[in-house]
Image: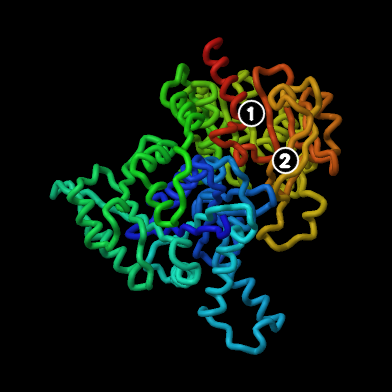
Amino acid sequence: MNQTKYIFVTGGVTSSLGKGIIAASLAKLLQARGYRTTIQKFDPYINVDPGTLNPYEHGECYVTDDGAETDLDLGHYERFLNVPTSQANNVTTGRVYLSVIEKERRGEFLGKTVQVVPHITNEIKERMQLLGRSGDYDIVITEIGGTVGDIESLPYIESVRQLVWELGEHNGIVIHLTLVPYLAAAGELKTKPTQHSVKTLMESGIKADILVCRTEHELSQDLRQKLALFCNVKKEAVIQSIDASTIYDVPNLMLEEGLDKVALKKLDLPEKNTPDLSQWNEFLHKLKNPKHEVNIGLVGKYVELQDSYKSILEAFIHAGAANETKVNVISIHSEYLDAKTADEQLKDLDGILVAPGFGGRGIEGKIETVRYARENNIPFFGICLGMQMAVIEYSRNVLGYADANSTEMNEGTTHPVISIMEEQKTITDKGGTMRLGAWKCHIKENSLAHRIYGKTDILERHRHRYEFNGDYLEALENAGLKASGINPDTGLVEIVELENHPFFIGVQYHPEYKSTVANPHPLFVSFVAAAVKNKVCC
């Protein structure tokens, strides 16, 4: 193939319709047909990246191998395709404007007045084609964040219009995701919101090639014909996206609807072979036919918004299927947990995960949770801040350092068992300045971590400023808390664990970012297995 093909996914009527899932599902089908496919997300907010956003604002911040702090949809892309994403897969308005302004300051525009058209749109188009020009992909799917008609999205919509025209016929198509709501009072589905959304798109100069309709009820043939007629698309290009029991059903639903076939036809590409979804469907079978069931507590301080821990929740789904176990994740707010309420809130759990996070709110509840899991032999898993809380808890309650803490929470503690990384001490900017991306870890043999990974050298993704204080390593190890994973270059403690416990492990990195359908993360798989064993034996 000589030219990379482009698919643009836009959304209308309302946000949160699932553009990312549709994009990932289509990419999965195209990949399963033998096409080299990738997905990228263009977000209309002015933040340079989501790294400085509160999880309540935007859900979790997903981190790639190359250290990019990105939108959580990139997690879906990786989980579906089992292919790593990078800095190039997520672009924001902030990043676009920053780049254009830097070019203007360098004098690259030769004194011209810098405007949205053509300078901003040219920058967007360059970034839209960056992955395609690498030669690594046959098809690039680009998800446009926000909703058509939003002020923030206008430069992206205009860029898509220009690029589709420039690419020429069959080289760029637009999929528009919209809502067909059901009005209970009238007892029928309504197409008018979709019609208005398509009209808004057309007013921007873009004709949708494929219409994907989110709906709670089946679309009749008459309704499909009506949508095709009023929205100026072929009837076979009206695709139903009905509510599913799990997002992992969506590739099969899109296969049944023929979304991949319609897209390939529009792009003038051969269908090649039938998509091979055998491994995917084996995962789905295990997911839907569990032999066991466990309750695992997710103790964090952003639990009101499920998207705050999206990758963790998805990793539990992957690990649950691998263990043929239904994992019920029980969200517990650490801010409302203390020594008096711990037993009541934690006693019925088969395993406990203490979640990552930043800041002092809810910290004592997390420390109390670690103590409860340790003393009651409940399988425990701490991630990032959760690992640090395990170190603090052990220092306080086993070593007897009553005020042991992290300098993030208490700069004046006499026992800073967790302290800011040396290279972070002079950094004042918040955005993109943490220890980010994939870093090496050497695992000690004959440890729990070694049994889990089955190897001594791994690469895992990080997102933190504070670390285990090496000054306390000897005292903690002598007291029984072992450092079983160390960064070979910096000496940073990456993994801590307890030997005389059913399952007790804390990691400084974020294993949830690397868990996919095809490769569930071994830490989550082992943790769920330990929870199953704990439930059976205890």
Mark 2 crowd level (few <14, some 14–19, many ≥20, 10 Å Cα): many
Q: Position of residue 277 (x, y in %)?
A: 47, 34
Residue carrying label 1: 522
Q: Decide if residue 309 is in sight here.
A: no
Residue 405 numbered tag: 2
Q: Decide if residue 196 is in sight here.
A: yes
Q: 75 above or below 519?
A: below
- What secondary structure is marked by label 2? strand
Mark 1 crowd level (few <14, some 14–19, many ≥20, 10 Å Cα): many
**Mark in front: 1 vs 2:** 1
Residue nearer the viewer, 103 or 468: 103
- Amino acid bearing label 2: Asn
Q: Position of residue 307 (x, y in %)?
A: 49, 45
- What secondary structure is marked by label 1? helix
Residue at 58% from the left image edge and 42% from the top image edge: 362
N-terminal label among 1 and 2: 2
Residue at 14% from the left image edge and 48% from the top image edge: 185
